[in-house]
Image (cartoon, rainbow, N blue to C red):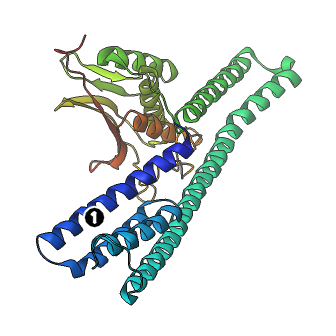
Amino acid sequence: MSKKCKYYFTNIGISLGILTLVFGVSVILQEVFSMGESITMLFVFGVFLISALTEGYLFGILSAFFSVFAVNFAFTFPYFSFNFTIPENLVSALVMIAISLMTSTLTTRLKAWQTLKVEGEKERMRANLLRAVSHDLRTPLTGICGSSTLMLEAEGELTDEQKRAMLTGIREDAEWLTRLVENLLSVTRLDGEHVKLYKTLTALDELIDSTVQKFNRRYPDAPLSVLLPDDVLLIPMDALLIEQVLLNLLENAICHASGMKSLVLSVVAKDGVATFSIEDDGCGIDEEKIERILQGSTLSFGEGADMQNRHAGIGLSVCATIVRVHGARIFATNLDTGGARFAFDLRIEDTENAE
């Protein structure tokens, strides 16, 4: 169905529904309760609702004219005939049309303002993302350019150990850029209006094993421990995307949880929901930034980080986006014992009914 057809069907449906309801209530008021004097005000209220709930001016004005004729024909003596010589009928017509015009004008302006507000918010998010990308790209690119230039210009003066250290740094920076591009691609794919998420039943143990193996390859010395339920859990998800969320959150703790000695990835199953949690005992999150940290509106949340504060909030924004398209919500809190906790929920598939 085209957008124009949808517009007409929706607004016609709203108008007919309200007018039918008003007409029916008016018949009851007149025939059962003998309250004919309230019918005009009831139709005025109906015109107001139609003008407020439909788009533009057309349906509000049409409903005003219909209401005038309906009141004059069905609820004003002489019944079932039109008579516009009575001053009250003319005043009612003018009042309904005026209400329709004023309400439609206010509603149209309010919707236009809301549209501008949404567009402004999108532009702000784009600007934040652009600043974040620029921030995240600068450090690894500078390291790659510096190390490669030094190796080319002073090749004979460098020891094998120095060369190996530079090559290791180049590889790490290149891997960092690769993960950044993966995050950006995820945001591009998932932030559209028509997101198609392909969920498959994924065993929790397999998901966590894959995540931990990849994380340990990147950070072999990380103090990571894992706590999982004893039962076999099948969870409908896009496994690659959820794995990306877990890796981003774990890496985020490594980069920003200054003073961290413990990092725990845990999953708790209760009432058909699996709660994924990443906890650390580091420096925690600035209280001023905790509300917007998952919205891409801040470049970093941990000053004095151990790894040059490379993260610019992109990874966390990607986590929020991925979890959102899974129909859930991710949240961050500071622990009373020190450190931070990131958690999100996913529905668990009933293993008895699963194919």
Query: Which residue occupies 73% across, 33% down?
Result: 141
Nearer to the camera, 157 or 51: 51
Q: Neighbour class for label 1 at 10 Å: few (<14), some, many (≥20)? A: many
Q: Mark 1 points at which residue?
A: 23
Query: Which residue occupies 18% across, 17% down?
Result: 231
Q: Is residue 117 above or below residue 80?
A: above
Q: Position of residue 281 (x, y in %)?
A: 34, 41
Q: In this view, does 113 lie above or below 246?
A: below
Tell me if 31 is positioned left or right of 335 in this view. left
Q: Where is residue 269 in the image (x, y as percent from the top left)?
A: 20, 29
Q: Residue furthest top?
A: 355
Q: Position of residue 116 (x, y in %)?
A: 59, 61
Nearer to the camera, 178 or 325: 325
Q: In this view, does 62 lie above or below 195?
A: below
Please state, as top left, top right, bottom left or bottom right, where the C terminus lies in the image: top left
Whether residue 280 appears in this view of the structure is: no
Nearer to the camera, 97 or 325: 97
Q: Residue furthest bottom?
A: 87
* Mark 1 residue type: Phe
Query: Which residue occupies 60% across, 30% down?
Result: 185
Query: Which residue occupies 23% across, 79% down?
Result: 38
Q: In this view, does 129 lie above or below 90?
A: above
In the figure, residue 228 lies in which quadrant?
top left
Q: Where is residue 336 in the image (x, y as percent from the top left)?
A: 27, 51
Q: Is mark 1 on a helix, strand or loop?
A: helix
Whether residue 353 appears in this view of the structure is: yes
Q: Which residue lies furthest to the right in this view?
A: 153
Q: Which residue lies furthest to the left in this view?
A: 32
Query: How many numbered tags mark residues here?
Result: 1
